[in-house]
């Protein structure tokens, strides 16, 4: 079984990219948070090179950018531009919820693949069976039976609900409409396993009429549909295995809570992510690279 790995990546410090985004947004932007490049991709790739040597190929899907530290001639690495998989009428696009719908179109991508953001890291030697069992993707989710009630409560009290949470609600509302079933789960925000054929079925067939209009959402929007819809579909079709990971399996570290190493030492997680947010400051982010460099000091084989 061949297994590939896909990253969405953007260098939010790139002046050309910033200028393009500001043009379509029609306002000046603060790069801090979601788009700021803290060299996470370099260390994420080091963690994969060290702990997942069986990965066949690594695809990096990006908007006309190339990581400066990467040997793009290495046979294991392939930079894929948005223009290669996305229709030109929706480009440029800055919305990961939309871009994710085109990953399955990457030329040469294997049927079994892992999807990761650059803030997700591997911290233990793992076999393919950690992600796939009997050819089926293991769906690691957070059990949360009150997700919908929480959103309804926030609406009642007129609290602001971010577009990410709304996109999850849109996904399970859409799934329930088609399958009359509800899974009380939410994403665990770490490396996920997929079958390419499931993504294709969801985007091009089962939910095509609802998903296609969201392609025009150049930026995050309340009508976005989160990729957990593919997980729901896989579970309903018995093409996925649902599990609820503990913190020793998948641990989420928040950038603004800088006791990173303490949590790593306490939980010894196999996977962890460093989740940036509006709560983090430049002082918090300055601690990211030293922490990661200490964990992953050795260059990857495809690093310059």
Image (cartoon, rainbow, N blue to C red):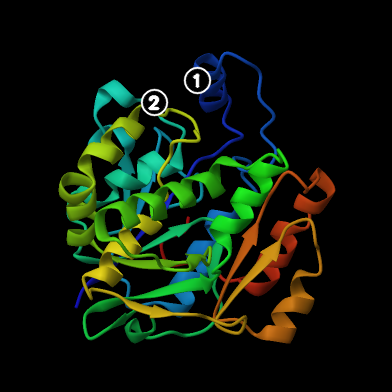
Residue at the image position 75 percent from the left and 70 percent from the top: 260
Q: Position of residue 91 (x, y in %)?
A: 34, 25
Residue at the image position 68 percent from the left and 39 percent from the top: 160
Q: Position of residue 71 (x, y in %)?
A: 40, 53
Task: Specify whether 250 is left or right of 178.
Answer: right
Task: Specify whether 101 is left or right of 270.
Answer: left
Q: Residue furthest right?
A: 283
Residue at the image position 84 percent from the left and 49 percent from the top: 283
Identify the element where label 1 is drawn: helix
Question: Which residue position holds label 2?
Answer: 92
Question: Which residue position holds label 1?
Answer: 20
Task: Specify whether 76 is left or right of 149.
Answer: left
Residue at the image position 29 percent from the left and 75 percent from the top: 240
Specify the quadrant that holds the N terminus: bottom left
Real-space CA distance between mark 1 and mark 2, rounded to the nearest whole angstrom? 8 Å
Nearer the N terminus, badge 1 or badge 2?
1
Name the foreground residue: 76 vs 254.
254
Q: Would residue 56 be visible to someone looking at this image?
A: no
Query: Callout 2: 10 Å neighbours few (<14), some, many (20+)?
Result: some
Q: Pointers 1 and 2 in contact (CB under 8 A)?
A: yes
Name the foreground residue: 188 vs 186.
186
């Amino acid at each position: 079984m061949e297994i590939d790995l896909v990253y969405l990546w953007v260098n939010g410090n790139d002046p050309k990219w910033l200028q393009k985004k500001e043009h379509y947004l029609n306002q000046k932007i603060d790069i801090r948070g979601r788009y700021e490049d803290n060299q996470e991709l370099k260390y994420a790739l080091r963690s994969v090179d060290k702990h997942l040597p069986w990965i066949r190929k690594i695809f990096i899907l990006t908007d006309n950018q190339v990581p400066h530290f990467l040997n793009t001639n290495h046979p294991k690495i392939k930079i894929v531009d948005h223009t290669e998989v996305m229709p030109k009428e929706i480009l440029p696009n800055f919305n990961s919820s939309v871009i994710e719908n085109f990953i399955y179109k990457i030329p040469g991508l294997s049927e079994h693949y892992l999807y990761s953001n650059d803030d997700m890291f591997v911290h233990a030697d793992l076999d393919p069976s950690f992600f796939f069992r009997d050819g089926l993707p293991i769906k690691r989710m957070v059990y949360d039976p009150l997700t919908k009630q929480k959103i309804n409560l926030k609406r009642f009290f007129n609290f602001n609900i971010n577009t990410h949470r709304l996109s999850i609600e849109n996904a399970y509302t859409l799934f329930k409409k088609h399958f009359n079933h509800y899974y009380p789960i939410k994403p665990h925000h770490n490396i996920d396993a997929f079958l390419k054929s499931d993504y294709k079925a969801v985007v091009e067939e089962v939910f095509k009429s609802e998903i296609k209009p969201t392609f025009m959402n150049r930026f995050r929007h309340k009508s976005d549909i989160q990729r957990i819809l593919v997980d729901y579909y896989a579970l309903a079709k018995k093409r996925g295995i649902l599990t609820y990971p503990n913190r020793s399996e998948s641990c989420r570290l928040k950038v603004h809570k800088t006791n990173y190493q303490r949590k790593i030492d306490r939980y010894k997680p196999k996977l962890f992510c460093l989740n940036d947010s509006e709560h983090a400051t430049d002082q918090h982010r300055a601690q990211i690279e030293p922490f990661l460099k200490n964990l992953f000091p050795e260059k990857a084989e495809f690093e310059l």
